[in-house]
Amino acid sequence: MEKNRAISFFHRKPENYNCAQAILLAFQEEFNNIDDEKIHEFKAFGGGRAPKGYCGALYAALSLDFPEEVKNEIESKFIQEARFITCREIKTNKTLSCKKCVQLAENIVNQALVLHEQE
């Protein structure tokens, strides 16, 4: 697992991938259910437009094919660092930049992959 892959995709020209797309692209090799169509669909989930107003990076991380208990851990770890789960709250309270949210989500997913592999 290469670190900072998501950051390398985030707002990369000419595609201008959003936070949610960057997370999916970073883990496309690890998860079989991430095709180009799904990445395109997640264009709608950046900038606070994910369901329930979730941070797009977190929403994408939670969409990965993990058991529910792992998804709960991902969300919990994200909240520990970002303090919030919605894009609006994160931006309003200036807890993390969008780039830092992408980096955080990627790091948490990488940790989950390592732990999940050991089970």
Image: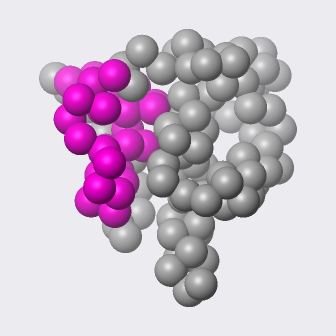
User: Residue 35 vs residue 76: left or right?
Assistant: left
Which residue is pictured at 48% across the width and 20% down the height? 45
Tell me if 78 is positioned left or right of 34 in this view: right
* Colour scheme: one colour
Q: Residue at x 79, y 43 (%)?
A: 79
Direction left: furthest residue: 14
Count every numbered label the image shows and give the total.
0
On-image quarter of the N terminus? bottom left
Q: Is residue 34 magenta?
A: yes
Q: Is residue 35 left or right of residue 8?
A: left
* Residue 118 lies in the magenta stretch: no
Q: Is residue 91 left or right of residue 119?
A: right
Instruction: Report which quarter residue 67 is drawn in.
Output: bottom right
User: In percent of the image, x 58 and y 68: which residue is there?
Assistant: 111
x, y percent for residue 49: 55, 13
Q: Which quadrant is the C terminus positioned in?
A: bottom right
Magenta range is 15-41
Q: Nearer the viewer, residue 93 or 85?
A: 85
Residue 103 in sight in this render: no
Whole-percent x and y of residue 62? 58, 44
Write the residue at 23% across / 29% down.
37
Q: Position of residue 47 (x, y in %)?
A: 52, 16
Res 12 visible: yes
Q: Is residue 72 above or below residue 114?
A: above
As rendered, which of 100 and 63 lies closer to the eye?
63
